[in-house]
Amino acid sequence: MTENKNNTELIQKSLARRYRAEKRFQWYGMLAIAFGLLCVAVLFTDIIGKGHGAFRQTYINLDVYYDPEVLGITDVSDKAQLMVADYPAMVKQALRQRFGDVAGRKERRELNKLVSNSASYRLQDRLTASPMLLGKKEKLWVVADDDTDTYFKSMGGRGEAFTGRVTERQQVWLKELIESEAIRLQFNWNFFTNGDSREPEQAGIGGAAMGSLLTLLLTFLLSFPVGVAAAAYLEEFAPKNRWTDLIEVNINNLAAVPSIIFGLLGLAILINVFHVPRSIPVIGALVLTLMTLPTIIISSRAAIKSVPPSIREAAIGIGASPMQVVLQHVLPLAMPGMLTGAIIGMAQALGETAPLLMIGMVAFIVDIPSGFSDPATVLPVQIFLWADSPERAFVEKTSAAIMVLLAFLISMNTVAAVLRRRLERRW
Amino acid sequence: MTTPTLFISLLVMMACLYYLGRQRSVALARPLGGIRSLHSLPFYYGVQAALWCGLPALLLLILWLLFDEPIITQIVVATLPDHLQMNSEAEYNLLINQIENVATGALPQDSVDPALVEAADELLRLKGITQMALSLVTLAVAMAGGAWAWWKMSPQLQARNQVEVVFKSALLLCACVAILTTLGIALSVLFESLRFFQAVPFTEFIFGMDWSPQTAIRADQVGGSGSFGMVPLFTGTLLISLIAMTVAVPAGLMSAIYLAEYASPKLRSFAKPTLEILAGVPTVVYGFFAALTVAPFVREAGMGLGLTVSSESALAAGLVMGIMIIPFISSLSDDVINAVPQNMRDGSLALGATHSETIKKVIFPAALPGIVGGVLLAVSRAIGETMIVVMAAGMAARLTANPLEAVTTVTVQIATLLVGDQEFDSPKTLSAFALGLMLFTVTLMLNMLALKVVKKYREQYD
């Protein structure tokens, strides 16, 4: 009797302990998930917090006077004169008129640094578009310098403004501009249309995005047909022997080879042996194709596997040859699954940086590439380059570029998920 | 005719031949009582004719393009006067570059030796001739092939079988790309590494304790003689990977267990895709995050505790790499946990075990091989990860186990040695390939091991 009671007590005691352990274990699990979710939240708020400002840019209102003497233009219809005219002097003149009391070289230089030197290109564009402006005055919003931009944006927020390289005299001028409402924020179209630049206020992701598009397009055109063909062979035709086993093991291993190794391959074989030029979308696409091919093959094989054998048997039963079965029945039915796999592979390729560093896609390229053999860079590499730049304004640009890249990636993955849900058939 | 136009005209010819072949097969069958009397469908006759027209010509075109340039440069260089005949390979390449630049107009003619201008003219002339010859020969071959197919076509011709053989070979060729890639990787790193090991002994590379690849490029430069010992690089890589795994394995595993065993469907449908976002974030973004947010934070926190933390500490890079790997481990573990048969769970619960005891004592041991495989794959990813460490870890090789100091990794060194100008006869550049060889071998072994473990495990319950 006593023994029984003891046992019950023991069990009661141990039960409490065991339930505590159970609770603790659940807590660990919840903590782990909370940590993961926290990481996502911190990562995104950090990037968005740093980068949202880059979508707006500071503009300064100037009264510009298209003075033929300052510009050195005698004949407006002469295109050559319009090309070489001294627009920077015109900007300087406009600034000096705005803040009359400036004497001394140093002060003047500080004054001129308030606006971006892209302002003079804007004037040139205006005058080339409508030559009647010569000799007339105009109120114009011109892009501010990146230091001015950073200063003005930080004013809007909490308390103390970030001065950085803005001198006290410049601050006085800027405060005056703010009081007379001659400085404002506008949507930053330049960020989407411009190529790279050493000046943060002129730098944009247009060139890199175009490079990414070209590279990705070529990667898709190369990797999707080859991947699907390889998958079709391995699933439908390959005899079971040592060779096909070798190919299988190979593909699985290639999928896990570090991406930087593919950069070594591109450098040693494609550039040094086959003399493919550096820095162009073609070589980027070749390397990325080799890198994404295993992913595409693996997902295509899964898609082919999911087509039920009854379809094949029915086709063979009415007299189709094995090749006809594959081309006319299996592949069309497996296409949605293969496309989803391909989109995921392309998303991977879009975010890849390391192998591209090795094949010269890190070059500083101002022009927007217009073909597969123009020197180009891609979005992730542009992010890497900007992240290395010392100017504070580039932090904002980098984060904004990351936001754009992430938006692309997330929408690609969403499209893949939707496709999978909509088109994939359950047999 | 330029090469692209040649290519397009070949495609057009193939299209024509397809149409002609198809028509001809139908015409041949008409007196015999319709296409029923053909061996194959008219489509296959068309394709067969098109293939006969296109394939030999394309093969010829590719071979020609592969070999014509070296032959032309050989001929041009042979015509050069004696004083320009160069001995070393570098001078030879420079000379060829000059000639090509003059030919394309990139280099003004009056800035170089007149003999080079002549050579450039010769080069242009030869290029014109070969291009012309190439167009003629290719088109002739295409026509001959097409005519042959037209000539040989008969209702008994097994067009479908022939076409299918070609298709099947093409599929096989595509499947072989994977093998060729592996072969290419192995050969490229091996070949350059062998050249490196001629300059630096293998044992010194493997066991050397000092890494400073900055060698003097010119004789008059004051520079280190360069030492290539990879031990500090590997310890640095291992240190960062270890930190990453200590973050990722508990977090990934526990979240997988919680999601698979405890979470309500609602939480699961929200948390799983959200965690998977982490897997889709490009590594360059993590690198930026590590360098600009986590590293300063770690530094501040360390200062608050009275520790000296380097601004490029291994801890920051490792932490962020761990975050990157969490979804990798959690999704792999989720798969294996879900693959454990339900009746094992039911059996354990029926014996009175609590849920956590069931997980710890029954499910976890059953899933262990799969989890180990997943962790091995994750380690191989951590070792091969480049962008995070390039952006957030240091450059200087230091032999230390202190996570607060800056260390460098194998991948960082490969990237820094190969970005920018490369000198393919200096050990400095070649050492990157030797490091690549080591990286490839280590990750390959890890992957093979992991795949083997996972495969073996899968067979148990299937």
Image: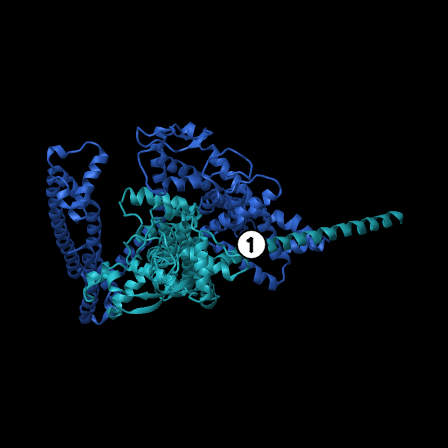
Chain colours: A cyan, B blue
SS category of the residue bearing label 1: helix
The residue that appears at 49% across and 56% down in the rendered structure is A50
x then y, percent, for residue B121: 11, 46
For the question of whether residue B315 can be seen, the reply is yes
Q: Nearer the viewer, residue B85 or B203?
A: B85
Residue A302, image quadrant: bottom left
Residue A246, image quadrant: top left
How many numbered marks are there? Answer: 1
For the question of whether residue A344 can be seen, the reply is no
Tag 1, which chain? A
x then y, percent, for residue A68: 24, 64
Q: Is residue A298 left or right of residue B87?
A: right
x then y, percent, for residue A167: 44, 52
Outermost residue, right side: A1
Q: Is residue B90 left or right of residue A307?
A: left
Q: Nearer the viewer, residue A405 or B305?
A: B305
Q: Is residue B65 above or below residue B440?
A: below
Q: Which residue is mark 1?
A: A39
x then y, percent, for residue A54: 44, 60
Residue type at mark 1 is Cys
Q: Nearer the viewer, residue B211 or A173?
A: A173
Q: Is residue B298 above or below residue A62?
A: above
Disc 1: CA contacts within 10 A as few (<14), some (14-19) or many (>=20): some
Q: Is residue A141 left or right of residue B231?
A: left
Q: Nearer the viewer, residue A172 or A304?
A: A172
Indicate the quadrant containing the N terminus of chain B: top left, top right, bottom left or bottom right: bottom left
